Amino acid sequence: MKMSWKSFVSGMVLGSVLFSGISYAAPKVVKLVVNGNDIHSEVAPQIIDGSTMIPARALAEALGARVFWDEDNQTVVVENEEYRRLQRKQADISERDAAGLAADAQHHFWQMMIGGGGDHKDGSFDVKGNDYRWMGTELDTKTKYIEYLELLYTPEQAQAYWKQQTENGSIVEIEGKLAQPNADGGSRLEWENAQATFIQEGNGVKTFRFSVPIEDSSEVKEIKLRFVEGKGWRIDEPVDTIR
């Protein structure tokens, strides 16, 4: 039987099961919780014959990994952000690595929008008539915030975004700690499934064209990447370009 890659990646990670005349009970559906969050997937985690089977894609993505199908090598590939960051330190960058960089950028953008990880102080407070909340401890100072941006963006783009956010009130600094408006959001663009195509290069800059799925269609965006000495390839576009 031939199985599509989507069926495999979205399906269960199963070992070999030998059937005999023994009668087995129906699989028991269980919950999957990663870092305190309930994870919902196309195929629910189940207990089958005493073993717990977890959907590979749902678990990997909940842990911040990217899952994709390598058609040429007939391989399901799982890569986390730390691995991709090491790959991008090289003097060249592939279309696959560029796609991973864009996927990480979208994840970082929405992490910033929800205040980042770590401990969050409870409650909210008023700033000039607007409701604000403290950022999580991973992003609660200017230094941490800019360092987080520079993991994926050029220093110039990181500084420009910091200036924009503080000038328009999206970030306020109070006694060295950061806070943001008490609101959340999301995106329908699937940057984690985007396809990157190399277009041109020059002066340490490479431009890629991205086809980004959105529901039953796609959007096309051109993104410039620049090699930053000592750090690797970084996005040289405004931070809110990928969101």
Image (tube, rainbow, N blue to C red):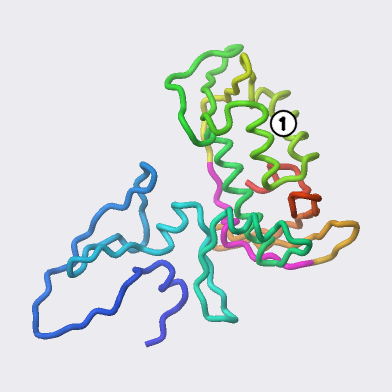
- Quadrant of the image for the N terminus? bottom left
Closest to the observer, 229 or 51: 229
Q: Residue at the spot x=64%, y=20% of the render?
A: 172
Rendering coords of residue 87 (x, y %): 66, 61
Residue at the farthest right position? 203
Q: Which residue is mark 1?
A: 162
Quarter assignment of residue 211: bottom right
Rendered position, 230 above or below 122:
below
Rendering coords of residue 6 (x, y %): 46, 71
Q: Amino acid at mark 1?
A: Trp
Classify mark 1: helix, strand or loop.
Answer: helix
Pointer 1 local density, CA inside 10 Å: few below 14, some 14–19, many at least 20: some
Residue at the farthest bottom position? 1
Rendering coords of residue 225 (x, y %): 77, 55
Quarter assignment of residue 145: top right
Range shown magenta? 186-198
Q: Is residue 80 left or right of residue 240?
A: left
Q: Is residue 237 left or right of residue 12?
A: right
